[in-house]
Image (cartoon, grey):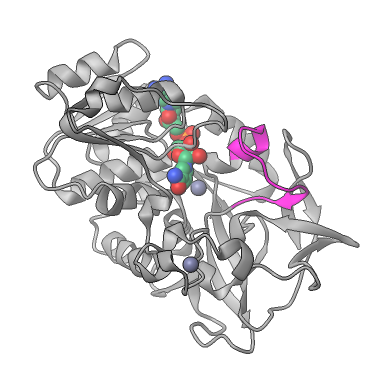
Amino acid sequence: MKAAVLNQIPGHLEIEEVSIGSPGPREVLVKTVAAGLCHSDLHFMEGTYTTDVPAVLGHESAGIVEAVGSMVSYVEPGDHVITCLAAFCGHCEDCLGGHPARCQRKGADLVRGPGEPSRLTRGDEDLGQFLHCSSFAEQLLVHEHALVKIRKDMPLEKAALIGCGVTTGLGAVFRTARVDPGSDVVVIGCGGIGLSAIQGARIAGANKIIAVDMNSPKLELAQSLGATHVINASDTDPVKAVREMTDGGARFTFEAIGLKQTAEQAFQMLRVGGQATVIGLIPLGTNVEVHGVELVNEKILTGSNMGSTQFRTDMPRYVDMYIDGRLKLDEMISGTIRLEDINEGFAAMKTGTVARQIITF
Ligand SMILES: NC(=O)c1ccc[n+]([C@@H]2O[C@H](COP(=O)([O-])OP(=O)(O)OC[C@H]3O[C@@H](n4cnc5c(N)ncnc54)[C@H](O)[C@@H]3O)[C@@H](O)[C@H]2O)c1
Ligand SMILES: [Zn+2]
Ligand SMILES: [Zn+2]
């Protein structure tokens, strides 16, 4: 099958012919229908984060089950599924405590053992499986705990967005921060993640929803998805502007870029007792600083991993929200591209001008 392989870090993706195994007892083989480009893939290509290479990248996808292992009863061939990197072991303290996205056992329990053949290979060489998915490929072979079954009337190219970006943004609002109706919300960064957080704030009934970005068309898109106010950070100090708009600071802020500066801005924008949630992946080794005295004002700085998702529950709900019109996904897709155009897609992402780009297979 064709797949986009990262051979070195930093590096571009190369479209290559690779092999995929057949399902082990708890594994599922999926025909990939669509895969989204997320900035997290780009962080690994650029080397702000690292992974074992060579590896097939991609982690936001939806498809149709082709075959299942002998112990799998949750799905069967023909089922429609969304994959998710927040795979869960199902028996650790975090999973059983209601926080499967925190599961630390997935690296041990959900991958193949050292003596077993790799799920993905190129000739005699093993290929890494990126974030339990490797979505930039015509097929996926994943542990059954890395996917969720969805209704068949959900278009799969829209469903793919829910595999990472949408769930992360909505979950950061619903599950990590638990935004309550009537509170003021700021979202810094209007890519796929930030636009989803804006939609989450709208669905949660927030009062002011202030979108911050440096790209005007992105701010217009943010308004169409629920932002009530916008700030262009290329010509306006966003901290000062938010303080003025909210009478001293917002109750909830979300950073959806992955920069030290914007994470610090998210904290500086808070009112007394407010909470800043950093969703963006800040480069490894970078510290984020706050004024110590502000902590006495009971301000909280935290992060969100995949929107603290319980994805087997959350994703089917988000599918329902799309079908009934509350969650807008068509508007978030800037373009549909071919696997062969993936590097151009990431180059466009770097400019900050696109929302989500989807590869269809
Ligand atoms: N925590 C998680 O589980 C998780 C999950 C998915 C993605 N992420 C991370 O979330 C971040 C956002 O991902 P994305 O795919 O939406 O990215 P993206 O590149 O599509 O969007 C980023 C947006 O930020 C804007 N921007 C850049 N610099 C800015 C600045 N200084 N001020 C204001 N706006 C600025 C850009 O114009 C762009 O609209 C990335 O760091 C990604 O790795 C985290
Ligand atoms: Zn992602
Ligand atoms: Zn677990």
Q: Residue at x 61, y 80 (%)?
A: 26
View extreme (right): residue: 124
Residue 29 occupies which quadrant of the picture? bottom right
Residue shown at the point (81%, 72%) measured from the top left? 115
Which quadrant does the C terminus fall into? bottom right
43 drawn magenta: yes
Nearer the observer, 338 or 64: 64
* Residue 264 visible: yes
The N terminus is located in which quarter? bottom right
Q: Seen in the image, is 104 located left or right of residue 21?
A: left
Q: Observer-nearest residue: 215 or 303?
A: 303
Residue 265 drawn at (x, y percent): 32, 22
Count of number-bearing discs: 0
Which residue sits furthest top? 235
In the image, taking residue 341 as reference, residue 97 lies left or right, namely left
Query: Residue 303's image quarter?
Result: top left
Q: Nearer the viewer, residue 186 or 220?
A: 186
Determine whether 301 is above or below 159 in the image: above
The spot of residue 49 in percent (x, y) is 62, 38
Residue 245 in the figure: left or right of residue 232 = left
Q: Is residue 87 magenta?
A: no
Give the residue displayed 32% in from the left and 47% down from the top. 172
Q: x, y (%) of residue 350?
A: 55, 28
Tell me where the magenta segment starts and ends, as one range.
42-58
Residue 222: x and y, percent?
29, 35
Instruction: Identify whether 336 is placed above or below 231.
Output: below
